[in-house]
Image (tube, rainbow, N blue to C red):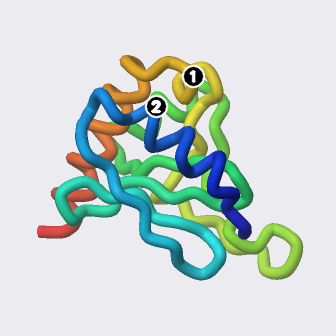
Amino acid sequence: MAVSDEFAEYVVEQLSSWGEVSIRRMFGGAGLYREGTMFAVIADDVAYLKVDDSNRDDFLRAGSAPFEPYPDKIKTTIRTYYEIPADVLEDPDELAQWAERSWLVARRRKK
């Protein structure tokens, strides 16, 4: 679950117009935080956003897959995070909209 500095910095840069995002490294991956709330993870240079019933269908329509932290060892799928579609990741304005919804999901779950 390695995360390259270049990819992590790219994702944060893509989100820079949305607000201040910080990275916390953990277990070989990284969590992305805004205002103390984790709304995304990066693993193996793939970025995932937090989902629930309010935004999961957007990811499914885009063909995104859920986060699998150990695909080669244990078949564990974490269905609360889905891969950010490539076209969304490349468009800072659209990424900001998707990130905002995921951040709100994470804030609701935190309460």
Q: Residue at x 65, y 66 (%)?
A: 77
Q: In front: 65, or 23?
A: 23
Q: Which residue is drawn at 52% across and 41% down?
A: 11
Q: Do the residues labelled 2 and 1 touch (CB within 8 Å)?
A: yes
In the rendering, at what x and y percent does residue 76 appear? 69, 73
Which circle's residue, 2 or 1, is located before the other in the chain? 2
Give the crowd class for mark 1: few <14, some 14-19, many >=20 residues within 10 Å.
some
In the rendering, at what x and y percent does residue 49 appear? 46, 47
- What kind of residue is marked 1? Glu
The residue most toward the right is 72
Separation (CA) of disc 2 from disc 1? 7 Å
Give the crowd class for mark 2: few <14, some 14-19, many >=20 residues within 10 Å.
some
- Location of the C terminus by quadrant is bottom left
Above or below — where is 71 with respect to 4? below
Q: Which residue is drawn at 27% across and 57% down?
A: 106
Q: Provide the residue designation for mark 1.
A: 90
Q: How many marks?
A: 2
